[in-house]
Image (cartoon, rainbow, N blue to C red):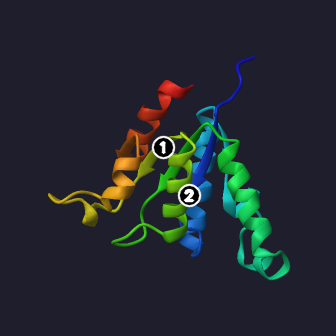
């Protein structure tokens, strides 16, 4: 039986809509045959846990999630700039030599000057505008 590639799913997780989208995307990635580390669930990173668990534990769990993954998929929606935690995760994953795929579905942000901050965009192996494009890029990893 082939070993499933492991994805670390980075992205904002502070509103219900963001968390719901992350779960939806995680479930679709699992359906495609990947194992997925979702920080809001697997990293003990939610509002209740932050009150109960020291932030260092959340940080360590998420760093370990990146260390143990094959691919980082980063959701880059959320406004004119990338979520600061997601930006850090991208930088760390880049430094570790991980494959990095970005997903930015907010069509208001695509323009002639680029898609996201150049430091983020150049770190990525690919930047996709919708989930189907993302899945097409990931087929090569299965």
The residue most toward the top is: 1
Sequence-earlier tag: 2 or 1: 2
Q: On the image, numbered disc 2 is attached to which residue?
A: 89
Crowd rating for badge 2 (residues with CA inside 10 Å; few <14, some 14–19, many 20+): many
The residue drawn where x is 70% and y is 58% is: 62
For residue 107, what is the image quadrant? bottom left
The answer to whether 81 is drawn above or below residue 64 in the figure is below
134 up-or-down from 83: above or below: above
Q: Say whether residue 88 is left or right of residue 110.
A: right
* C-alpha gap between disc 2 and disc 1: 10 Å
**Residue 104 seen by the camera:** no
Q: Is 50 displayed left or right of 24 in the figure?
A: right
- Residue 115 x/y as whole percent: 28, 57
- Residue 100: which disc? 1
Q: Secondary structure at mark 2?
A: helix
The residue lying furthest to the bottom in this view is 51
- Given residues 97 and 101, the one toward you in this image is 97
């Amino acid at each position: 039986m082939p070993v499933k590639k492991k994805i670390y799913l980075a992205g904002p997780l502070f509103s219900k809509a963001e968390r719901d989208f992350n779960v939806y995307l995680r479930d679709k990635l699992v359906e495609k045959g990947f194992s997925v580390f979702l920080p809001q669930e697997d990293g003990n990173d939610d509002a209740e846990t932050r009150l109960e668990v020291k932030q260092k534990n959340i940080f360590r769990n998420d760093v370990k999630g990146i260390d143990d993954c094959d691919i980082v998929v980063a959701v880059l929606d959320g406004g004119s700039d990338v979520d600061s935690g997601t930006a850090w995760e991208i930088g760390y994953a880049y430094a570790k030599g991980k494959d990095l795929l970005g997903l930015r579905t907010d069509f208001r942000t695509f323009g002639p000057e680029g898609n996201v901050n150049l430091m983020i965009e150049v770190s990525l192996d690919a930047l996709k505008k919708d989930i189907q494009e993302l899945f097409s890029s990931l087929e090569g990893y299965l």
